[in-house]
């Protein structure tokens, strides 16, 4: 009986560890430059800020046709939110961190922007 309780406890701890890594684990960091074509606030319970950055060039879509090279991102940083709201359509460089998963109150994408620089 003690072995079964120990195994169950071990599985619970392992599950919590994997979920913690899945939620808070960073996958990559980087910067991207382009024009912000969409920036909005979404949500019913938790408002999140979502944006799209067109980086130029073309990519292929699921139908095999050409599509704009768009980078979708989220942010919770108030300085980033203020800068993007004050400079609609501006050419910017964003600094982001990609996570394996994010909490529902942080955004709809796995890319969280922490810094933005307006290019003049």
Image (tube, rainbow, N blue to C red):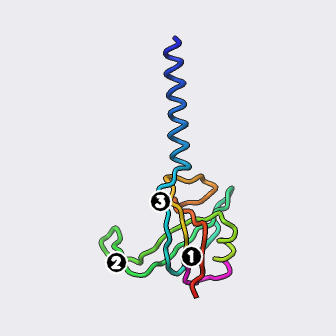
Q: Secondary structure at mark 1?
A: strand
User: Which of the 4 image quarters holds residue 62?
Assistant: bottom left
State the mark number for residue 66: 2
Which is more toward the observer, 75 or 52?
75
Position of 87 relative to 27 (above/below)? below
Q: Secondary structure at mark 2?
A: strand
State which quarter of the image contains the C terminus: bottom right
- Alpha carbon of mark 3 to alpha carbon of mark 1: how far? 23 Å
Q: Give how far across and how far down residue 82 sits, in percent.
A: 69, 74
Q: Is residue 86 magenta?
A: yes
In the displayed structure image, the side of residue 65 where residue 46 appears, left or right:
right
Q: Residue furthest left?
A: 64
Q: Is residue 97 magenta?
A: no
User: Which of the 4 image quarters holds residue 16?
Assistant: top right
Q: Secondary structure at mark 3?
A: strand
**Which residue is found at the position 50% from the left and 28% from the top?**
11
Mark 1 surroundings: few (<14), some (14-19) or many (≥20) residues within 10 A? some
State the mark number for residue 28: 3
- The residue stretch that appears in magenta: 85-93
Which is more toward the observer, 40 or 36?
36
**Which residue is found at the position 48% from the left and 78% from the top?**
54
- Alpha carbon of mark 2 to alpha carbon of mark 3: how far? 27 Å
Q: Earlier in the sequence, mark 3 or mark 1?
A: 3
Tell whether label 3 touches label 2 (CB within 8 Å): no
Q: Give how far across and how far down residue 5 sits, in percent.
A: 53, 18
In the displayed structure image, the side of residue 67 where residue 80 appears, left or right:
right
Position of 88 relative to 14 (above/below)? below
Tell whether label 2 touches label 1 (CB within 8 Å): no
**Which residue is found at the position 49% from the left and 53% from the top?**
100
């Amino acid at each position: 009986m003690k072995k079964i309780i120990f195994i169950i406890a071990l599985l619970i701890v392992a599950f919590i560890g994997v979920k913690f890594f899945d939620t808070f684990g960073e996958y990559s960091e980087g910067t991207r430059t382009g024009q912000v074509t969409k920036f909005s606030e979404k949500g019913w319970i938790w408002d999140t800020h979502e944006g799209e950055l067109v980086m130029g060039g073309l990519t292929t879509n699921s139908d095999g046709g050409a599509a704009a090279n768009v980078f979708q991102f989220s942010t919770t940083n108030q300085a980033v939110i203020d800068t993007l709201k004050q400079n609609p359509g501006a050419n910017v460089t964003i600094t982001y961190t990609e996570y394996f998963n994010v909490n529902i109150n942080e955004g709809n994408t796995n890319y969280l922007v922490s810094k933005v620089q307006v290019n003049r």
